[in-house]
Image (cartoon, rainbow, N blue to C red):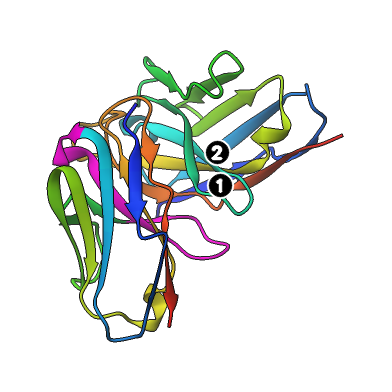
Amino acid sequence: EVQLLESGGGLVQPGGSLRLSCAASGFSFSSYAMSWVRQAPGKGLEWVSGISGNGGSTYYADSVKGRCTISRDNSKNTVYLQVNSLRAEDTAVYYCARAAVVYGSGNFYNPFDYWGQGTLVTVSS
Amino acid sequence: EIVLTQSPGTLSLSPGERATLSCRASQSVSSRYLAWSQQKPGQAPRLLIHGASSRATGIPDRFSGSGSGTDFTLTISRLEPEDFAVYYCQHYGNSPHTFGQGTKLEIK
């Protein structure tokens, strides 16, 4: 069974940092690209960042570029999102999502077929 | 960046009725990279359709997708009580991936 379990969220002051983790199980992790998607309270979905299966390619939304770093450890079946210089507008549930293997293994340009349950990040003083 | 605009914002229908949800892209996109997802309150999104018209694993055949170019449609042929949720279209052919703002399907 595919499982994605996010952790690392919490309350942080503006300007602070967090590292989110997503532990994967039930599939060959390195064969799949992964992404982070966030959802502010009562709002829609916003893609944040993605990484290819081998970690060689990374992608960022303009809203977080320069403040976020996505990485993965395929030996630990875990993807990470380091978020720095946090702002109130970063407050959201952060989901990790697996990119399906429809158009090539590990390829970022695939639909999200599995999602975790999310971890809440609240940026407030 | 591909901007996706969904309509209507809210759709009020009764169980058993047919639902038609629209997603319009700001420029022509390959249908290969257009998906639809469903999200219920307090839950993560669930993939329904990818490649504009291919149902994801386990998705009932009352859900269908169509379209090309800039105009895409999700159709639910006969609404079941569990279908009332928010639906998002998504484009994943570029970076950044983008989502529409969502259509809320509510019980009339």
- x then y, percent, for residue B43: 53, 61
Residue B108 visible? The answer is yes
Mark 2 belongs to which amino acid? Cys
Q: Position of residue A120 (x, y in %)?
A: 67, 45
Query: Which structural element holds mark 2?
Result: strand
- A103 or A13, which is in the foreground? A13
Looking at the rendering, the stretch of residues picked out in magenta corresponds to B28-47
Q: Chain of mark 2?
A: A
Asked if the stretch drawn in magenta spans residue B68, the answer is no
Left or right of A102 on screen, residue A99: right
Q: Locate residue B42, reporting x and y percent.
A: 58, 62
Q: Against A111, is B64 above or below? A: below
Q: What residue is disc 2 on?
A: A22
- Front residue of A70/B78: it is B78
Pointer 1 residue: A5
On-image quarter of the C terminus of chain A? top right
Q: Residue at x 37, y 74 (%)?
A: B83
Q: Which mark is residue B100?
A: none
| Quarter of the image where one finds residue B45 | bottom left
Question: Element type at marker 1?
Answer: strand
Determine the residue positioned at 24% across, 57% down: B56
Instruction: Please tell me which of labels 1 and 2 falls first in the chain.
Output: 1
Q: What residue sits 33% from the left and 82% below the top?
A: B80
Q: Are marks 1 and 2 in contact (CB under 8 Å)?
A: yes
Specify few, some or many for label 2: CA neighbours under 10 Å numbering under 14, 14-19, or 20 or more. Answer: many
- Specify the quadrant of the image occupied by residue A74: top left
Label 1 marks a residue whose chain is A
Task: Please state which amino acid type lies under the numbered disc 1.
Answer: Leu
- Residue in the image at 73% along x and 33% along y: A88
